[in-house]
Image: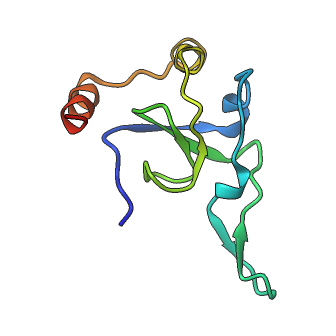
């Protein structure tokens, strides 16, 4: 069953791609239903599409923290980029919840 995180914020893909170390796992994008023989295939991500940055600094194509993971190379540089460039800040309630769940 998909897991909801405590906090996430949507950003346009163009903003996320501004990170120098961005490595996109495009094969993990949500699936588009295709009437052809291939069935469901990952959708093609456009710069105007919105992705979700979660409290653990993982980026997904959807609101679930553990599905359709597009970026998970969480480093101090990525966290700094999220704070300084994207102005992403994890609220205190999400930080506290995150610490409790990791025990």
Q: Residue furthest right?
A: 36
> As displayed, is residue 17 above or below residue 76?
below
Please state the horizontal and vertical placement of residue 10, each as a whole percent of the image.
Answer: 53, 39
> Percent from the top left, x then y, of residue 72?
56, 37
- Residue at x 51% of width, y 37% of height: 58
Left or right position of 65 against 61: left
Above or below 16: residue 44: below
x, y percent for residue 15:
68, 29
Q: To which quarter of the image does residue 21 belong?
A: top right
Of 3 and 15, the residue lying toward us: 3
Count of numbered badges drawn on the protein: 0
* Residue 88 placement, left or right of 43: left
Tell me the residue at 35%/66% (across/down).
1
In the image, is residue 38 above or below residue 43?
below
Q: Is residue 57 above or below residue 30?
A: above
Q: Residue at x 56, y 55 (%)?
A: 68
Q: Nearer the viewer, residue 100 or 34?
A: 100
Residue pictured at 59% horizontal, 15% vertical: 77
């Amino acid at each position: 069953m998909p897991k909801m995180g405590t906090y996430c914020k949507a950003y346009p893909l163009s903003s996320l791609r501004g990170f120098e170390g961005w490595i996109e796992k495009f094969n993990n994008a949500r699936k588009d239903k295709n009437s052809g023989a291939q069935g469901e295939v990952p959708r093609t991500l456009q710069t105007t599409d919105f992705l979700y940055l979660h409290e653990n600094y993982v980026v997904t194509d959807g609101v679930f923290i553990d599905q359709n993971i597009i970026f998970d190379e969480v480093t101090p540089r990525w966290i700094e980029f999220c704070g300084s460039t994207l102005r992403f800040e994890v609220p205190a309630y999400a930080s506290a919840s995150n610490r409790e769940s990791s025990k």
